[in-house]
Every structure is written in structure tokens, then in C-alpha cells.
């Protein structure tokens, strides 16, 4: 794993000390990359690159600024000038993705934006862009790109999503795109899933919710809980599909590299490898979708004859010093 840290890191130590909500950088090297060095096509797999600050360091006081910076760099690197179909996710960072698209100044009159939920549809239309529901896109349409956030991202770019209860729509939109781009702030980057974010969101048919809970416990989940509305008297939260969400805690998940190194991720004692657990949960009758995004990236899926993949080809993390860390997925 290599780190490239851009210039303009003056006062970074002070900023990190005063920004406890963020992760600290693991390197203090100061190497200024070439202007295109943070574009994922130039990065080796699973490596970090830090791009210079998008906004002055003096303004970097909030998580929201970090999200905005990540969105600007991600859109600059991945939004096609002639885009026809673009997926827009439901994460909290997506408002800044739409903002960045508007600030590009490109003609979007012929571009259609596919939302992953009611709120993202409203965000699209409020920005003066054209929203088209997923079930209304013409047969055979492939999205040029899909942007979305994540609740947590590991060293291999596996993601946990579903904190906003839109995981099913988010997954089908990612699977319909040539490439999925993840945009987040530095708090979301962890070495293993379920390190900081403690549970896996699972969308479940209401009639099967208690059965699914029992099965999750058998898989090693610790007290899987039905997610309630903010006003608890209203009962369980319902997704756009009218389903429930079960939030299922598990111990931190192993990566494929952990398994290759000899660790057992088959589920013994509740210890799972990311993809293995995702498949095990998906097989439970009553489960619509699992909030683990893993497996193939878009290009890998296309090489195998499919349309798109659920793992991002690149993830952008806004850092507290104003820089943006870019991580690229493996090609093969």
C-alpha cells in the first residue's frame, strides 16, 4: 500500500488535532503528484492518492466541507461530458455530487438522472435536472456512471450501505452502470467493514421479519434489530418498497486478502469474509437485499458478460486538511 500526499499540507497536524470526527493520516510524506496522478486510471490497485485541497484549508472546519471536496474531485474525474444516463445515490454526500455536476457547466439537457429513492429524486429535480425512475428507463439502457456514498468502506473497497434505507435501489442502480463511484468523508474509510459502523442493513419482507432475525442469529449476528421510525410510536420504518430493515451486527468482516493469508471466513464463531456473509444472508427466504456491496466492479462484470458491478471502481474520501484521498479497486 502506498500513499501520495499532495502539497498545501501546511498546518495539517493542527487541523487533525482539532477535527476529532476525522481519521488521522497514516503517513506524513509530502510528495506532490502530477496533476492527473489522482485519477484512478493512473493508480495501482488498492493504493491511496491524496489530491491538493479543493477549498482553502482555512475553511476546512466541518465534515460537510470534506464531503463537498470529495464530490468535486470524483465528478471532475468520472462525469462524462457526453453523459446520457447517470445514477444518483441516496447518501448524504450526494447533494454535493449534484452540486459539482451543476458547477461543471456542461450541457445536461439531454442527460437523464436515475435516482435511488424519493429524496434523491427530489434533489435531482430541485437542481433543474431530469429524473427518470429506474423502472422507466428503456430496456437495454446502461448508465454511464453511478455516484453514491457509503456507511463504511474497507481496504478492498467493499462497502456497507443502507443507513438511509435505500439499499435495494442503490444496488440495482449500481448494477446497471458501467462504473460505480463512491464518495464519502474520511470517517467512512476503515481497514475492515464493521469496524466503526457496527451493523449490516438488510431489507426484509414484513411477513418474514422474525424468521429472518432468527436465521441471522444462527449466522452469528448479535441481536439483529428491526429498524424503527424516528417517531417510535409509528412502528418499524418502511422502505420505498414497503419492506422493513433489519440492522444486523456482526464482528468485523474479513477481506479476501485475510482469507488468502489463512484466516477462516466461513462463519465459524461468527467470523465471516465479506462476500461469503453477503451470499449467506441473501439466501435467507424473505430477504430482498443485503447492504453489503462487494464482488465485481463494473468493468469486471462487463468482462464476464454482465452489465455492471456493485463494488466501486474508485472511492473518494474528503480529508480534514482539505485534500481528497482516492482509492482504486483491483482491475482483475
Image (spheres, rainbow, N blue to C red):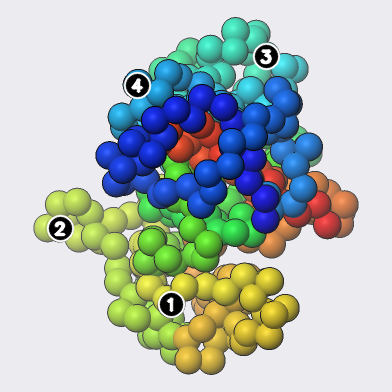
x, y percent for residue 141 = 75, 35
Which residue is nearer to you in this view: 6 or 68? 6
User: Viewer-nearest of labels 4 and 1?
Assistant: 4
- Number of callouts in the render? 4
Considering the numbered disc 2 on the image, is that residue within a helix, a strand or a loop? Answer: helix
Q: CA distance from mark 4 to mark 1?
A: 37 Å
Residue 115's label in the rendered image is none
Classify 148 as above or below 189: above
Q: CA distance from mark 2 to mark 3?
A: 43 Å
Residue annotated with mark 1 = 251
Using the rendered view, name the quadrant where residue 39 is placed. Answer: top right
Of label 2 and label 3, which has the lower sequence position?
3
Considering the numbered disc 4 on the image, is that residue within a helix, a strand or a loop? Answer: helix
Q: Is mark 4 in CB contact (under 8 Å) with mark 2? A: no
Quadrant of the rendering where the C terminus is positioned: bottom right
Of label 4 and label 1, which has the lower sequence position?
4
Considering the numbered disc 3 on the image, is that residue within a helix, a strand or a loop? Answer: loop
Which residue corresponds to the image point at 83% horizontal and 49% vertical from the top-left? 302
x, y percent for residue 299 = 80, 47
Seen from this angle, which residue lies furthest left?
Answer: 233
Classify 48 as above or below 125: below
**Other-residue count near label 4 (Cα within 10 Å), few / some / many at <14 / 14–19 / ≥20:** few
Quadrant of the rendering where the N terminus is positioned: bottom right
Classify 81 as above or below 256: above
Which residue corresponds to the image point at 58% horizontal and 42% vertical from the top-left? 29
Q: CA distance from mark 4 to mark 2?
A: 38 Å
Q: CA distance from mark 3 to mark 1?
A: 46 Å
Residue 110's label in the rendered image is 3
Amino acid at each position: 500500500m502506498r500513499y501520495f500526499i499532495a502539497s498545501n499540507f501546511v498546518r495539517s497536524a493542527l487541523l487533525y488535532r482539532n477535527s476529532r470526527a476525522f481519521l488521522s493520516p497514516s503517513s506524513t510524506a509530502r510528495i506532490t503528484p502530477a496533476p492527473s496522478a489522482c485519477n484512478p486510471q493512473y493508480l495501482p490497485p488498492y493504493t491511496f492518492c491524496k489530491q491538493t485541497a479543493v477549498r482553502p484549508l482555512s475553511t476546512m472546519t466541518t465534515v460537510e466541507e470534506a464531503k463537498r471536496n470529495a464530490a468535486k474531485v470524483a465528478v471532475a474525474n468520472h462525469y462524462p461530458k457526453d453523459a446520457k444516463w447517470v445514477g444518483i445515490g441516496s447518501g448524504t454526500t450526494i447533494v454535493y455530487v449534484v452540486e459539482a455536476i451543476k458547477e461543471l457547466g456542461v450541457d445536461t439537457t439531454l442527460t437523464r438522472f436515475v435516482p435511488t429513492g424519493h429524496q434523491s429524486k427530489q434533489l435531482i429535480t430541485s437542481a433543474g435536472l431530469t429524473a427518470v425512475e429506474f423502472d422507466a428507463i428503456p430496456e437495454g439502457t446502461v448508465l454511464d456512471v453511478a455516484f453514491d456514498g457509503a456507511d463504511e468502506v474497507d481496504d478492498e473497497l467493499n462497502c456497507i450501505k443502507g443507513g438511509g434505507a435505500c439499499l435495494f435501489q442503490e444496488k440495482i442502480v449500481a448494477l446497471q452502470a458501467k462504473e460505480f463511484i463512491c464518495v464519502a468523508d474520511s470517517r467512512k474509510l476503515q481497514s475492515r467493514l464493521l469496524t466503526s459502523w457496527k451493523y449490516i442493513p438488510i431489507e426484509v419482507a414484513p411477513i418474514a421479519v422474525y424468521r429472518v432475525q432468527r436465521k441471522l442469529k444462527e449466522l452469528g449476528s448479535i441481536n439483529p434489530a428491526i429498524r424503527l421510525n424516528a417517531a417510535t410510536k409509528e412502528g418499524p420504518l418502511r422502505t420505498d418498497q414497503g419492506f422493513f430493515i433489519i440492522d444486523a451486527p456482526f464482528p468485523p468482516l474479513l477481506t479476501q486478502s485475510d482469507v488468502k493469508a489463512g484466516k477462516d471466513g466461513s462463519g465459524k464463531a461468527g467470523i465471516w469474509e465479506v462476500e461469503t456473509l453477503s451470499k449467506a444472508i441473501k439466501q435467507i427466504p424473505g430477504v430482498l437485499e443485503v447492504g453489503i456491496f462487494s464482488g465485481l466492479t463494473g468493468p469486471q462484470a462487463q468482462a464476464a458478460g454482465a452489465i455492471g458491478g456493485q463494488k466501486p471502481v474508485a472511492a473518494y474520501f474528503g480529508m480534514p486538511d482539505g485534500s481528497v484521498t482516492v482509492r482504486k479497486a483491483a482491475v482483475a
